[in-house]
Image: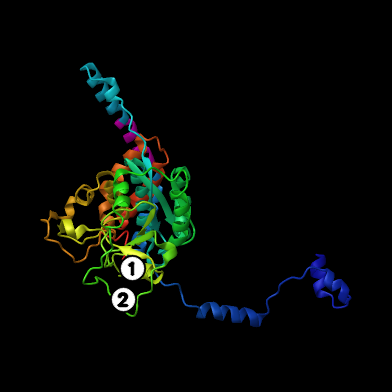
Amino acid sequence: MEVAEASTTSSQPAQDDQQQPHETTTTPAAAQTSTAGAENAEPAAPMSKNALKRLRRAKEWEDGREDRKRRRREKRVASKARRREERAELLAQGADPAVLFAKRAPARLVPVSLILDCDFEAYMTDKERVSLSSQVTRCYSENRNFKYKAHLWISGWRGKLRERFETAMENQHAHWKGVSLEEGDFLAAAARAREGMRSAEGGEMADSLQRSADTAAANRWEKDEREPFPLPGPVPELDAEYADVVYLTSESPYTLERLEPNTSYVIGGLVDKNREKGLCYRRAVERGIRTARLPIGQYMKLRTRQILATNHVVEIMLRWLECEDWAEAFMRVIPKRKGVEMIADGDEDKTGNGGEDGDQGDQGEDGEKNKEDGEENGEGKEENGEDGEKNGEDEAKGSNSQDPK
């Protein structure tokens, strides 16, 4: 070859040598050094049995994705066929078609914003992030199916949460209506939510919100005598620019009595099994944001932790807008397996009102209900997220899903 001849002939001019392509040669000394380095390199640490099991389960789950979709489609078709048969039987018995086929009224938008603060990715494991994506999906479903719906915002929309929605959950969020995504923090979302609530399309004033507005002067924020989570050092002053923002956190010394119009309520999207205590509370206080906790301890006692999933908090807020009764909202949302026991008036439990924390273990029963809601509304993309939701339920049972602490 000409290249070989050029490399072995020393009489060629320097300029000819520059024009020829160079071959990379390895001297015996370099080969010996490379061999010695390879021999001295530490071998890769073997994977533990648990790690191998996790990999195997993940592969099995991924391999079964299409089969799960097929089973869900079959279940949906069977459910629709069963409903048609039931309706036909009722019609044969003389049922009024106008009543039987009455359509549910669409949700009415109100000037209240619910912001899911998903800016805690660094504090969660992969399994916990899967759980959070499931809960975000359910929050959307709940907000769509109630009588009143709030302006729903997801802040911190970036990183692995966004990646999961765009890959494993097949961009189902692209088909969502009435949800706004914000890459910035919860204050950036609150600023944009303020504009939306005060616009002409900001929504109608529900009766519950109108009564809150009429009694605004009487709705004073009174601080508890004992702070659930005292912070060292002086507490920063409240930021007047964000006086319309309330961060829900169980460590707050203030109790949420009513929802107020033109106000944004922030729910911390943190799944961490209660490891990072006070994280959301400190985050809000350091930025001069009002905080409040749900009044669970005023109405009931729980035999388990006073921890709810993110979607449960959203559902409680939406139910209050409809019934204006915290006790009813708690009873209809908080899972019975938590050992709910109503307490008499005046027998108030002031300790650990953690209505805004999350428990992934609560999500199994909600997932089926919300999936069916999506099917009835023709939201075909709801099924795409079910793989992720089920994965989160299987892997993260019992983990805190929303920990605005």
Indicate the quadrant where residue 382 lies.
top left
Helix, strand or loop at mark 2: loop
**Magenta span: chief secondary structure:** helix
Which residue is label 2 attached to? 231
Q: Nearer the viewer, residue 312 or 258?
A: 258
Q: Position of residue 77 (x, y in %)?
A: 34, 31
Q: Which residue is drawn at 32% across and 47% down?
A: 210
Tell me if 25 is positioned left or right of 46 in this view: right
Does the residue at mark 2 contact the one at mark 1 (Cβ under 8 Å)? Answer: yes
Indicate the quadrant where residue 401 lies.
bottom left
Q: Position of residue 112 (x, y in %)?
A: 37, 50
Q: Which residue is drawn at 80% across and 67% down?
A: 3
**Can the viewer see residue 404 in this picture?**
no
Q: Nearer the viewer, residue 2 or 235?
A: 235
Q: Is residue 86 magenta?
A: no
* 395 versus 151 height, above or below: below
Q: Residue at x 30, y 50 (%)?
A: 214
Tell me if 123 is positioned left or right of 17 in this view: left
Q: Give the range drawn in magenta.
A: 69-79
Helix, strand or loop at mark 1: helix
Tell me if 8 is positioned left or right of 401 in this view: right
As drawn, the label of residue 6 is none
Quarter of the image for the C terminus: give it: bottom left
Q: Where is residue 151 in the image (x, y as percent from the top left)?
A: 41, 49
As drawn, the label of residue 281 is 1
Q: What residue type is labelled 1?
A: Tyr
Q: How far apart are marks 2 and 1 (CA)?
A: 9 Å
Q: Nearer the viewer, residue 37 or 405?
A: 405
